[in-house]
């Protein structure tokens, strides 16, 4: 049965690959410009003026918009998680290919844990809009600061390793 499904999907391999690559690019780069040109300057201004009510209001607006901007990457990442294994299976690959083993290690060992935390911070217990609307200023402030630290730590990791994963997938150097 599974062989029949694989044989049926095989002619569509390049289409699956295109969907996978588009999703990878959307996941990696969808929020990059917003991070670099909105969040970073606003949070730098807040660090310089931590008690300025206008700067705090701008910071709060920016981080709530961030939770909305990342919807694109949070849609793209599950597509990556489905289309990647589908490509692996349809093509008949195995982890004997060093490029693939390294790519999978990065995705499972680095990206997946980051995204699990990111989903929580953006939608569940860490959703800033819900905290603000609930009136819990202390939880809101704590979550904003924690989310900012999380973004500072993970954004460079995603940019470097995301670029490496794309390189590995396209060039297959190992």
Image (cartoon, grey):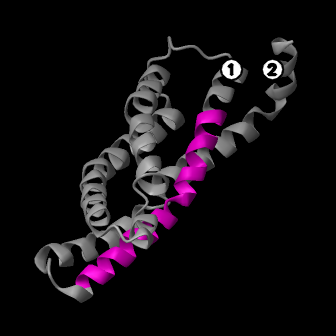
Left or right, residue 36 beside residue 90: left
Percent across and percent down for residue 146 are: 26, 55
As helix, strand or loop, the secondary structure at mark 2 comes to: helix
Q: Is residue 139 above or below residue 159?
A: below
Where are the magenta residues, as a range? 55-83
Looking at the picture, tell me which residue is in the foreground, 98 or 26.
Answer: 26
Q: Is residue 168 above or below residue 67?
A: above
Displayed quadrant of residue 89: top right
In this view, which residue lies farthest toward the front? 135
Tag shown at residue 6: 2
Q: Are marks 1 and 2 in contact (CB under 8 Å)?
A: yes
- Which residue is depicted at the point 32% across and 70% down? 39
Percent across and percent down for residue 125 are: 42, 52
- Which residue is depicted at the point 61% across and 32% down? 84
In this view, which residue lies farthest toward the bottom? 54
Left or right, residue 75 beside residue 62: right
Percent across and percent down for residue 8 are: 87, 25
Disc with the residue nearer the chain's start (1 vs 2): 2
Tag shown at residue 89: 1
Residue 72 on the magenta segment: yes
**Mark-to-mark CA distance, 1 and 2:** 8 Å
Tag shown at residue 97: none
Q: Is residue 125 above or below residue 30?
A: above
Q: Main secondary structure of the magenta part?
A: helix
Percent across and percent down for residue 25 are: 53, 51
Q: How crowded is mark 1: few (under 14 residues within 10 Å), some or many (20 or more)?
A: some
């Amino acid at each position: 049965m599974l062989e029949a499904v694989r044989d049926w999907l095989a002619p569509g391999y390049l289409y699956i690959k295109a969907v996978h690559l588009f999703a990878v690019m959307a996941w990696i780069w969808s929020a990059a410009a917003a991070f670099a040109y909105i969040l970073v300057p606003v949070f730098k201004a807040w660090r310089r003026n931590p008690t300025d009510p206008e700067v705090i209001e701008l910071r709060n607006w920016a981080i709530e918009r961030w939770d909305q901007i990342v919807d694109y990457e949070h849609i793209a990442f599950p597509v990556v998680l489905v289309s990647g294994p589908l490509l692996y299976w349809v093509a008949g690959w195995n982890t004997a290919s060093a490029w693939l083993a390294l790519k999978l290690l990065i995705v499972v060992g680095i990206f997946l844990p980051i995204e699990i935390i990111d989903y929580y911070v953006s939608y569940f217990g860490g959703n800033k809009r819900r905290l603000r609307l609930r009136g819990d200023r202390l939880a809101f402030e704590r979550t904003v600061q924690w989310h900012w630290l999380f973004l500072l730590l993970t954004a460079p990791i995603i940019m470097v390793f995301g670029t490496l994963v794309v390189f590995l997938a396209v060039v297959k150097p190992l």
